[in-house]
Structures are given as structure tokens and as C-alpha cells.
Amino acid sequence: MLNWDDFSKKIPIAKMMMITENISKVEWLGFYDESLKARTWTNEADFLTTKSDTFAKCNDH
């Protein structure tokens, strides 16, 4: 179980980089647990299939 109160509200959990105008890449870093002074849940984020996923813009139809 995750203790949400211990997670930093300021330290980023991921990086998003634009590859092109329509493609972005998300690198999951994990939550920073201030009580442990370390990141936790650094693998297997719910919305990513790998630690670093690429997303393409959907058609506007």
C-alpha cells in the first residue's frame, strides 16, 4: 500500500519530452518518498508498458 502523505508534492514523478510536434516520450521516474529519501514505485507504472513509452497524437476525427 502506498503512503501518499509521504510522497513529495514538488519532485517530478516523470519526464515528458516532445520528439516531434505529434509524438511525445514519457520517462517514468517514480514517486519520491520523503520519509525514505528515495524514489519508490519506479517500475511498472499503470499507464506505461515500459519504463519509457512513446505516445503519438490521435487523429482529430
Image (spheres, helix red, strand yellow):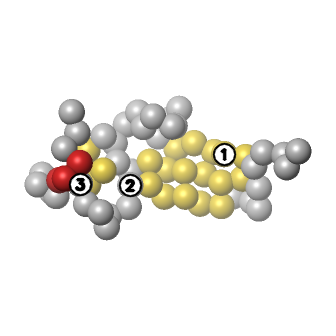
How many C-alpha atoms fall within 10 Å of the one at disc 2: few (<14), some, or many (≥20)? some
Where is residue 8 shown, x and y percent of the image?
Answer: 25, 60
Residue at (47% x, 40% y) in the render: 51
Residue at (48% x, 58% y) in the render: 15
Considering the numbered disc 3 on the image, is that residue within a helix, a strand or a loop?
Answer: loop
Question: As shown in the figure, which amino acid type bears the numbered disc 1?
Answer: Phe
Considering the numbered disc 1 on the image, is that residue within a helix, a strand or a loop?
Answer: strand
Residue carrying label 2: 13
What mark, if any, has residue 55 been given in the picture? 1
Residue sticking out furthest to the bottom: 10
Find out whether the residues at labels 3 and 2 contact each other: C-beta distance under 8 Å: no
What mark, if any, has residue 45 been given in the picture? none
Between residues 59 and 54, which one lies in front from this camera angle?
59
Which quadrant of the figure has residue 14?
Answer: bottom left
The answer to which of marks 1 and 2 sits earlier in the sequence is: 2
The answer to which of marks 3 and 1 sits earlier in the sequence is: 3
Residue 61 as seen in the image, left or right of residue 52: right
Question: As shown in the figure, which amino acid type bears the numbered disc 3?
Answer: Phe
Residue at (45% x, 34% y) in the render: 46
Which quadrant of the figure has residue 42?
Answer: top left
Residue 20 as seen in the image, left or right of residue 55: right
Residue 50 as seen in the image, left or right of residue 40: right
How many C-alpha atoms fall within 10 Å of the one at disc 1: few (<14), some, or many (≥20)? few
Residue 49 as seen in the image, left or right of residue 43: right
Find out whether the residues at labels 1 and 2 contact each other: C-beta distance under 8 Å: no
The answer to which of marks 3 and 2 sits earlier in the sequence is: 3
* Screen quadrant of the C terminus: top right
How far apart are labels 1 and 2 at the CA level? 17 Å
Where is residue 55 shown, x and y percent of the image?
Answer: 66, 45
* Screen quadrant of the N terminus: top left
Residue carrying label 3: 7
Where is residue 24 shown, x and y percent of the image?
Answer: 65, 54
